[in-house]
Image: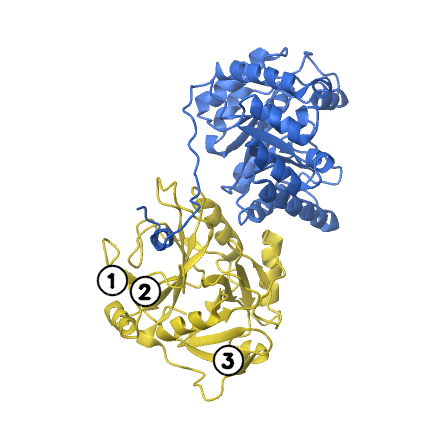
Chain colours: A blue, B yellow
Amino acid sequence: MNLDHFAIDAATLAGPLASRLAAIRNGDFRQVMLSASDIARDAENERAAAEALAASGLRAAGLQALRDFEGLSGPLHDYKVGIAKAMLGMCVTLGTRLLLVCSSTSAYAVGDEDAIVGDLRKLATLAVPLGVRVAYKALSWGRHVNTYLRSWELVAAANRSNLGLALDSYHVLAWNSDLAALQEIDRDRIFLVQLSDSLWNETRSIEDRIETARHHRVFPGEGVHGAEIDDFLRRLDALGYRGDYAFDAFNDDYRQIPADVVVVRARDAAEWVSERLTRRAPVVRRIHAASETLDAQERRAIGRTR
Amino acid sequence: MAPTEALPEPSNPLGIDGIEFIEYATSHPQASGALLERMGFHAIARHRSREVVLYRQGTMNLIVNAHEVVDPTPAIAAIALRVRDAGEAFRHSLDLGAWPMRTRAAAMELHIPGIRGVGDSLVYFVDRYRDFSIYDVDFIRIPGVDPQPPAVAGLHWFGVVQAIEDGRTQDWIDFYRALFGFTVLPSGRYFGVLPKGTLLESPCHRFYLQLIEPPTGAYELDWPERFVRVGFGAPDIPAATKAWRDRGIVFIDRGDVQPSDKGALTQAYLGGAMFELVVSDPSRGC
């Protein structure tokens, strides 16, 4: 099985960050999704987290999550821009090229399309010099943006190449959304797909849905929405999506059993997902040269190979 | 802004009007200065308190900053854009998502607002360039030197080449279009001897940015995002090439990189600094 395109969210595992990263690597995964709050809790600072990441040999698929960013004004907006800059800086330190942004739940945010589009553009511009891409995700309990289709409309309207979507199966399926509309999305603008399931058929209230999302998710293939996730995956595959899949099975039980046991479940999930996707070739990634000669300088300056 | 002043055109939101100066950083300013003098620049003034020298030829101002710099290879540290209102340009840029200039050993003590550019570089905004010189504040003229030395072979700023990572062309196009109003030249329209990458034209139509991704398959090549070289415009490239050769500048002359009527590329100097000549009418340049 080719695990190159799968990542586990470090916050779904128990233990200190370094040992969680080791468990993920020992499970033959190459990527990990990092949570800013998790790093703040667990590592001495983000530099220590970056060192732990480098020691593990894993690549960070992305950093989550900037919350309640869009639709604010005045001092609130300025404050959130400051938070966004700090998180973009964390992305650079951690060596990840993706910042995940969740649609706002703030009562102080407006739903005006021009305002949201302007804020997303501003975030995208801030991210360009740092080489970071911004993935906007519709939380199903978002105040104004809570469906994947609405998040796509806004991302498309903002029209910035480093601004795209994160599609989280939990939120996409929460509204029993029509998945046929996935074909309206430009596949190159889907920057990340997050996958998880749950063990009950319906959530009775928004609070119930939030509680389930944070504490009771399971891996795809383990829950009761296998058919819907199967449909979701096959549609993404047909669309031509070839990016990363990250497991975000936030579950209190998983956080109290050994990390390597949970990683085995993640491997099973990766196998379950892979059965539904077009087979892929292993990834070849750029390797930077350690030494330079005058010829190398010249080649670099004029952009020519040997 | 006074009510009688014209509002910026929508296509040129900052009122950009060319390049005021380009700043190089190096820990070996004498070696860089000697090289610049061979290219026709003259040291005009020294900074009042720092190891910073202003060079000039024709319409071009070039600053060599050695203040707290560790790398000997001269690197493009900043581009100063002439704008209608520097403060307004700065605020407008920040509103749209620019990062304000980080504290570093900037060349100018005079308050010139700046934003973060590619890599470690800065983009300054300068609005005092018609009846007042920003250099009068920070610099002391070198006695006995012509403060307005003529340009060798009609040299003028043509543009700057920027290395970008694989797949990042559109990101940077979006950046320069959103903040400054640059436009993409149609595919296939190139200048100079290296027809590659993407050319962006300034909203004042007076200079260009050339974005270059690493060559396909060049996995062994280190390719950090940064400004890599300046392009000098000249009306007659063979004449300009001869003038520089006579002054001791060596051009790459092999394979498909050879001096031509379109342009020429120097060898790498001082550990990797290269310079490009591009055919261009000086009335158009800056």
Q: Amino acid at mark 1?
A: Pro
Q: Residue at x 45, y 62 (%)?
A: B73
Q: Specify the subunit that label 3 lies on.
A: B
Query: SS at mark 2?
Result: strand
Residue A235: mark = none
Q: Residue at x 43, y 70 (%)?
A: B31
Q: Which residue extends farthest bottom? A: B144
Q: Are marks 1 and 2 on the same chain?
A: yes
Residues indicated by labels 1 and 3 sit on the same polypeptide chain: yes
Foreground mark, 2 or 3, reads 3
Query: Mark 1 = which residue?
Result: B259
Q: Position of residue B37 (x, y in %)?
A: 39, 75
Circle 1 chain: B
Residue A104 versus residue A66: which sits nearer the camera? A66
- Per the model, the C-alpha gap separating discs 1 and 3 is 33 Å
Q: CB atoms at circles 1 and 2 under 8 Å apart?
A: yes
Q: Earlier in the sequence, mark 1 or mark 3?
A: 3
Q: Are marks 2 and 3 in contact (CB under 8 Å)?
A: no
* Amino acid type at mark 2: Leu
Q: Earlier in the sequence, mark 2 or mark 3?
A: 3
Question: Disc 2 versus disc 3: distance between alpha carbons?
Answer: 26 Å
| Residue occupied by mark 3 | B45
Q: Quadrant of residue B115?
A: bottom right
Q: Is residue B159 left or right of residue B126?
A: left
